[in-house]
Image (tube, rainbow, N blue to C red):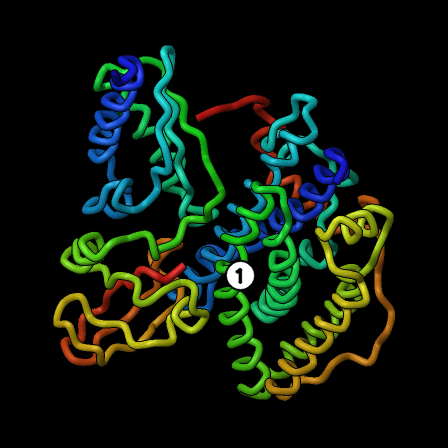
Amino acid sequence: MLNGRLMVETQNKELIYEYLSEVTDPEIPVVNIIEMGMVRDVICSEDEIEVFLCPTYSGCPAMDMIDALVKEKLHEKGCGTVKVTLVYKPVWTTDWMNVETKEKLRVYGIAPPEGSALSKKELLNEGPVGCPQCGSKNTEIKSMFGSTACKALYTCKDCLEPFDYFKCI
Amino acid sequence: MERLDLSKFCIRLGDSCLIMAHRQSEMCSKGPFLEEDIAQTNLGLDLLGQAEALLIYAAKLEGNGRTADDLAFRRPEREFYNFMLTEQPNTDFAFAIVRQYIMALYLTKVYETLAKVEDETISGVALKAVKEIAYHERHLGMWVKRLGDGTNESHDRIQTAVNELWMFVGELYEEDDLDVKLQEAGYAISGEEMKAYLMDKISAQLADATLSVPESVYMTTGSKKGIHTEYLGYMLTEMQYLQRAYPDAKW
């Protein structure tokens, strides 16, 4: 017989993940923190819920905001004490975003990371980046540093639209 | 590694990152053009994030109730252990570029080494930072070349920056007792190895930018004992103003 308490804990955990999927990155409202790969684990004990988050960029100002949003969301859902703990290892990487998440970014107007952060060439985005508007690969980098720490600024030479590129990291 | 030794090391590295982050933040709205203004402040933001992670860990290891905020905002000048190079002012754009370029080279090597240590927090912070610094090194290297190989004016100004900042490079490969302990535990490479690596990288980049390596051999020393140039005090006065004027202020 499956241990009753264990079953409750598993159910709770699934429920918490469901709640957390309603929390989005304040800078990129189309993807939630689970799709970003930021939620590493959730531990439900009798008196508290501990959420383990993996920070994206070291200096990402959205981190404190996400911490607050997680607590706000879980309180709103009636969870008692919520603790958010940052974990540094394994190190967050854009490689954790799946194809659907990347597509959401593209539809939103942000070119998703190309290739893998394991390759130094792709890490420093030397390869071609597709325009999220028209799909052309005929684009050029304007600045390696864009509107937020995670993005670079590009322009499409075909449709002439400027766009953000989510850097590989 | 002894807990307190590791804490001291995190403070040294964290201080260098914090002080550079503040210098970079001073360039906000003063960049040569909009995209570069954003780039320079982004460099500062990465360094601030690294500083925060290191100082939080240092405070935890210290275990005497001090927080990362206390370390950043309540220590006087003589208790800061950042390299003198990091506190040098943004005299002009070329000074900021040279300061940050040399430090990016240094940090690349430091984080590559730390990425392999057993301590999960340190290696986690380093693994993330090494990728961020790869962007810094490329961006700043591009500027060294662009200014050096640009107009006579830009060439002379960046050569002046290299010449005037040169005496602060020696500290990056200096060794004291703590450094020796770090090397024995695999947390740092030897001063000799660091010197060879830096000189190799810097001289190649300067040659490519039609600049010359200064002949002067005089190097300053002292930041590992909390001795600094006159610039740090003024900077801390501004950086720490709010916490000094309104202790424990929160918002």
Chain letter of the residue carrying label 1: B
Is residue A26 shown left or right of residue B143?
left
Residue A94, horizontal then vertical, whole percent = 35, 55
10 Å neighbourhood of mark 1: few (<14), some, or many (≥20)?
A: many
Residue A90 is left or right of residue A105, and the answer is right
Q: Which of these two is toward me, B249 or A13?
A: A13
Front-most of residues B169 and A67: A67
* Residue farthest toward the front in the current orientation of the protein: A1
Where is residue B203 drawn, in percent x and y?
Answer: 69, 81
Residue A11 pos. (x, y %): 23, 22
Please say if B114 is above or below A83: below
What residue appears at the point 18 percent right and 75 percent down from the top-left corner?
A160
Residue A103 falls left or right of residue B200 = left
Of the 4 image quadrants, the one containing the N terminus of chain B is top right
Amino acid type, residue under disc 1 in the picture: Ile
The residue wearing badge 1 is B133
Q: Is residue A152 above or below residue B116?
A: below
Considering every residue shown, the one lying at the far top of the view is: A47
> Can you tell which quarter of the image residue A150 is in?
bottom left
- Image coords of residue B128 (percent x, y): 50, 52
User: Which of the 4 image quarters holds residue B190?
Assistant: bottom right
Determine the residue positioned at 30% across, 67% down. A114
Q: Which sits in the foreground, B26 or A30?
A: A30
Q: How many marks?
A: 1
Tell me, yes or no, if residue B235 can be seen here. no
Q: Quadrant of the C terminus of chain B?
A: top left
